[in-house]
Structure formats: C-alpha cells, structure tokens
Amino acid sequence: MIGRICTRNFSSKAGKKVGFMGLGNMGFSMMRNCMSHGYEITAYDVDNKVMEKAEELGAKIAPDVKAAATDQDFCLTMLPNTDIVEQTRLGSNGIFENAREGSYIIDSSTISPIASRKMAEEGEKLGFKIADAPVSGGVTGAAAGTLTFMVGCKKDYYEEIEVFLKSMGSNIFHCGAPGTGQTSKICNNLMLAIEMIAVSEGIALGEKLGIDPAVLSKICSTSTSSCWSLNSYNPRPGILEGVPSSNNYEGGFGVSLVKKDLSIVLDSAAEVNLDLQFGTKAIEFYHELERQGKGKKDFGVVYQYIKSLEKK
Ligand code: NAD
C-alpha cells in the first residue's frame, strides 16, 4: 500500500479539504484512501459506529450534512439511493445550501441518471461544479484503491476531478455530460446482476453433477465463461479468500442495493421503451432473497438460493 501511494504524485493536492458523506462498506475504505493521499477529511454518516471508526483514523467528525459540506474543496457522497442523495444535496441544511460556491460536488453512489442530471442542472445554476462519479470494483476495489470511476461532468473541470478520484481508484473515465456516469454504471450493473446468476447456476449444476467447484471455477476462469463474478468474486464459499462468500456473505454488495440498481435499470429502460427480458427476470431473484430477509447479505448469496431450487 505504502509503495503504491509513494509512486503517485499527488503532492500538489495535499491539504485540500473533503466533506465525505456515507461511510458504509464502500465509503469507509474510499475515505481512508483519500486521507492517505493527503486530503483533509470531514466525515459524516448517520451511523455513529462508523463515525467513531473514522475519528480513530484521523478524520474530523461532522454532526450533520451542513457541517460536513461547509467550506470544502470537494463534497463527496457515497450513499444508498437516489432519495437519500437528493435529500443530502437539496434538503434544508443540505449540501447545496451550505457548500462554497465554485466547489466540487461529486456523487459516487449509484442512483438514477435522470435524477442525477436534474441535480447537476440545479447545482450548476448555484455555481457548483457537479459530477456524478459512480464506481465499480466492489468492496475489494474500494479497499485496494483500484476502483473504476465513471464520471459525468462538464469537460472544463474533469481534469481536477480526475486527480481527486485517483486517490481512490485506478481507472477514471470521462463518460460525457452530467448523468452519463450513472448511465454507464447502471448498464454495468445490469450485466453484473445477470452474470452473478449465470455463474451461480453453472457452479450449482457442476457441483450437483459431482465436479469439485474449485476445479470447475479454475477451468472456467480460463474458458469462455471467464468473468469477474467467477474469477474475482466467486459466490461459492471456500473457493476464493477475502471475498464475501467466504465470510458468510457479509460486507459486500448488498442484495437490496443490487435490487435497487435493477429498479433504476428497468425504469430507465421504460423511459426509452426497451424491454429488457433478462434484467426483468434477474430482479425477481434478488427480490426473493430480500423477501427471505437477506437484503443486507452480499449478492453472491444468490448462489445459495439457486442451489436450493428444485425442478417441480
Ligand atoms: P452501505 O449501505 O454499506 O453504506 C451506506 C452508508 O450510508 C451507511 O454507512 C449508512 O449509514 C449511510 N447513510 C445512510 N443514510 C445516510 C444519510 N442520510 N446521511 C449520511 N449517511 C447516510 O452501502 P455501500 O455498499 O457502501 O454502497 C454505497 C453506494 O455505492 C450505493 O449507492 C451502492 O449501490 C453503491 N455501490 C456499492 C458497491 C458495493 O460493492 N457495495 C459497489 C459499487 C457501488
């Protein structure tokens, strides 16, 4: 980690101030990486336990959004959904009421591209530099500082945003105007949500037919079914170390968050009159897991559900 930080040149950015809101499975690690690159963090989350952990790490703690947003160079949100991001930005005592004119207001949560574009229009009118910058790479990428960021913002200030985001990620893409980052992200997550189901079906079938799932996974990882859900995030416990499936599906990408993303996908598809049949089927799996009380478990738990299904 130290080697990685030292090889990058971020010294000119040291001392810049960041209001970081949302310190969950992703946000906490992102905040830590941001801090290691010399940014001064003021952190806010509704959960006091994560606030205590952030304070132990050296972050300043804010009692509310107002305190987190006031007098920052960057305000970054990493929150669960569209409503909460809207409330945090537009609500009374929110970011738009309190941030410094000319500051960067960046959202890395996965939310509706349409809502994201509207908020950008509103924020730009108030003199802020707004970007949607959702991420891919999961909790492992957040911890390692190797996230992919998909940025939607005006060209004029992409460069400075890129330098900031490099403290948390290794692949930063400018997708186009505000909202296009979220569009890239929901298309990625549509593919991912279906891919995880496909990998789970393949491994469940192989296991039931008697092949060692570790052997099958190794073979498939160099075959045409090779993909992230299989190679880097295998949903079958005991195949990969350090992934949620080997930790009772704790601490990863929650089922409810995947379901939320698929809802955004299907709403966006409806806007452009597109019938996404696999996406429509995939949301049923995650809906069922949520119904079973597994909304907070990592989405790889879909493997356990698929393994339990019997043909009627
Ligand atoms: P999480 O549920 O672990 O964390 C969300 C955090 O936001 C929690 O700490 C919660 O207490 C806090 N929060 C909720 N309401 C708040 C409010 N009003 N003000 C301040 N803090 C508030 O979620 P996560 O897994 O960290 O994901 C965050 C976002 O990133 C989501 O939009 C998700 O879809 C997206 N995402 C997640 C992953 C993943 O693998 N977990 C990957 C890519 C993108």
Image: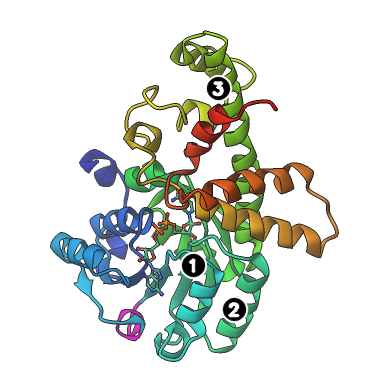
Q: Position of residue 238 (x, y in %)?
A: 36, 23
Image location (x, y in percent) of residue 254: 46, 50
Q: Amino acid at mark 1?
A: Asp
Residue at image location 43% in from the left, 79% down from the top: 103
Mark 3 crowd level (few <14, some 14–19, many ≥20, 10 Å Cα): many
Count residues near mark 1 (Cα–Cα under 10 Å), then give few for <14, some for 14-19, many for 20+. many
**Among the two numbered marks 3 and 1 on one chain, the one whose residue lies closer to the N terminus:** 1
- The answer to whether one can see residue 128 in this image is no
Q: Earlier in the sequence, mark 2 or mark 3?
A: 2
Calculate the distance from the C-alpha at mark 1 to the C-alpha at mark 2: 11 Å
Using residue 179 as the reference point, say whether residue 141 is left or right of it. left
Q: Quadrant of the C terminus?
A: top right
Q: Is mark 3 within 8 Å of ligand 1?
A: no
Q: Residue at x 64, y 39 (%)?
A: 194
Query: What residue would you read off at disc 2?
Result: 119
| Residue pointed to by mark 1 | 107
Of the image marks 1 and 2, the number of the one nearer the N terminus: 1
SS class, disc 2: helix
- Horizontal side of residue 112 vs 126, given as left or right: right
Q: Which one is in front in this view, the residue at disc 2 or the one at disc 3?
A: 3
Q: Is residue 257 above or below residue 55?
A: above
Q: Nearer the viewer, residue 248 or 147?
A: 248
* Label 1 close to label 2 by CB (< 8 Å): yes
> Gap in Å between the C-alphas at discs 2 and 3?
43 Å
| Mark identifier at residue 204 | 3
Q: Amino acid at mark 3?
A: Ala
User: What range is drawn magenta here?
Assistant: 66-72
Q: Secondary structure at mark 1?
A: strand
